[in-house]
Image: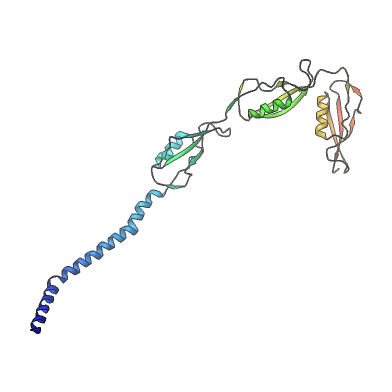
Amino acid sequence: MLKSIADFFKSVFRFLRLYYLPLFISFGVLLVIAVSVVLWLDMKVMPEYTRSGLEFSIPSVVGMNLDSARTVIEADSFKVSDEIIKKVDATKPAGTILEQYPRAGAKCKHGRKIYLTLSKGAQPVVVPDLIGKSPQDALYKIAEKKLVADSVLYEFSEDYPDGVVMGQSLVVNDTVDIGDRIFIVVSVGKHPSEYIIPDVKGQILKQASLTLRKGGFKITEIKYQKNTDLLPNTIIDQEPVPGEIVYQGAEVKLVVSSMTE
């Protein structure tokens, strides 16, 4: 009996081995091939495919005009954003690209929008009316308009009192650019009947020069003399001497301290 059962199972195993084992082996081989293909696609092909959209360099368009920048950007399959920022910049002509985002050389997918900032050029400003104002108020107005105060001149005037602006180099209400230079002329009052040389000894050269110019005098000579007891550029001597009565526009010579010969 046991022998008959054993013979039966042997027959079954022999049948399976002959007819189904090749099928199992073929299925196993196909499964291994399929898994290998999937792994190869996942590790090699797909990363290359997905990464390809991230490895295109953004071109540099800073310094170009908008039309040229658009041509360059679109030629590389990127897009110019409709949101274009404009900034006042006196150093670049209007319409010049000042900035871009993303920056040049950044890696982005095709179709990425590039945001641009354009120069509006120098912002025009209206020249303020400074006549009749104090020098301090005039300089404040000049700075407020973002103009540059070039210099302050002093002249006698029969029409304007001492200490007010009587002239300016730019015409009132004209349109100029930010950063343009302007100088003002300040009245020192009416011409005096007598001109008395002021005492500027002991003053710093800058202050002495201002004092003499306001008095209507001209500095024609400055000599430097070594003097370690005084601060550099201190007035040691002057000619004519203080208190002397002179003519209008008289010439003044100064001796100024120096640390060296």
Residue beneath the point at 74% across and 27% down: 152
How far from the left and from the top, in percent, is residue 47? 36, 55
* Residue 147 visible somewhere in the drawing: no
Above-or-below relation of 41 to 53: below
Of residue 37 and residue 16, the one placed in the foreground of this image is 16
Of residue 197 and residue 16, the one placed in the foreground of this image is 16
Residue beneath the point at 14% across and 74% down: 17
How far from the left and from the top, in percent, is residue 33? 25, 64
Find residue 211 and report its image quarter: top right
Residue beneath the point at 25% across and 62% down: 34
Find residue 258 and report its image quarter: top right
Above-or-below relation of 57 to 118: below
The answer to whether 128 appears left or right of 107 in the picture is right
The answer to whether 256 appears left or right of 94 in the picture is right
Colour scheme used in the picture? rainbow
* Residue 140 visible somewhere in the drawing: yes
How far from the left and from the top, in percent, is residue 202? 87, 35
